[in-house]
Image (tube, grey):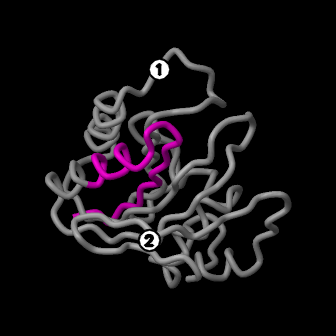
């Protein structure tokens, strides 16, 4: 079994799409480890705010099989593959890490570069996997977050209820 972390983001019908993605992931993989949910402004384009979180799960699947499943969930949410890279989206599921794998596997670059570049990925990852070590930087995610330069990026924790449980609370 591999421990993986997946970034979840949506700024189109975001509550419904995030909930549907968590339902699908839970149905396929069982217990999920969820970060708080954060609202953040789009990076690289003008648009509505995103909801973002990180999900941890264990899977026996290969990187390629898991990646295809994530794409299917995105497609089922109405994700447009013909839209510009920096644009609004119904759902974005990015495989951040797959155990300590480094390199390109089945067309997926691991660990994902956004981990150390964007607050909306690093903050929730540090929340649920703070003691884990980034396989390239060789620092814990908590340490990377402590030293992260937010620049113009802002995160706002928001209340989000999934499966009858509040996954985050404003003011966390």
Q: Is residue 85 left or right of residue 4?
A: right
Mark 2, other Cα within 10 Å: few <14 / some 14–19 / many ≥20: many
Quadrant where the N terminus is found in the figure: bottom left
Residue for badge 2 = 35
Find numbered disc 1 in the image and state the secondary structure of the residue it sits on: loop
- Asked if residue 89 is positioned above or below residue 158 in the image, the reply reads above
Q: Nearer the viewer, residue 27 or 167?
A: 167
Image side of residue 107 versus residue 139, left or right: left
Where residue 83 appears, as percent x and y from the top left, is 56, 19
From the viewer's side, name the closer residue of 170 and 26.
170
Give residue 114's position: percent from left, percent from top.
63, 52
Disc on the earlier residue, 1 or 2: 2
Image vertical order of residue 29 relative to residue 144, above or below: above
Q: Residue at x 71, y 56 (%)?
A: 117
The picture quadrant where one finds residue 153 is: bottom right
In the picture, the quarter occupied by the C terminus is bottom right
Start-end of magenta stretch: 1-22
User: As drawn, is 119 to the left or to the right of 63?
Assistant: right
- Residue 113 horizontal/vertical position (percent): 63, 51
Mark 1 to mark 2 CA distance (whole Å): 27 Å
Helix, strand or loop under label 2 = loop
Q: Which mark is residue 81?
A: 1
């Amino acid at each position: 079994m591999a421990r993986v972390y997946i970034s979840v983001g949506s700024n189109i019908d975001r509550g419904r799409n995030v909930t549907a993605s968590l339902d699908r992931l839970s149905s396929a993989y069982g217990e999920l480890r969820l970060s708080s949910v954060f609202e953040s402004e789009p990076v690289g384009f003008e648009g509505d705010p995103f909801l973002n979180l990180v999900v941890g799960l264990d899977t026996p699947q290969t990187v390629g099989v898991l990646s295809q499943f994530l794409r299917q969930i995105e497609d089922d949410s109405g994700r447009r593959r013909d839209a510009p890279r920096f644009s609004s989206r119904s759902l974005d599921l990015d495989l951040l890490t797959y155990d300590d794998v480094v390199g390109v596997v089945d067309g997926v670059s691991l660990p994902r570069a956004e981990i150390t570049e964007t607050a909306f990925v690093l903050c929730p990852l540090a929340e649920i996997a703070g003691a884990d070590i980034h396989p390239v930087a060789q620092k814990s995610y908590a340490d990377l977050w402590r030293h992260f330069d937010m620049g113009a990026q802002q995160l706002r924790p928001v209340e989000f209820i999934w499966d009858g449980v509040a996954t985050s609370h404003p003011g966390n």
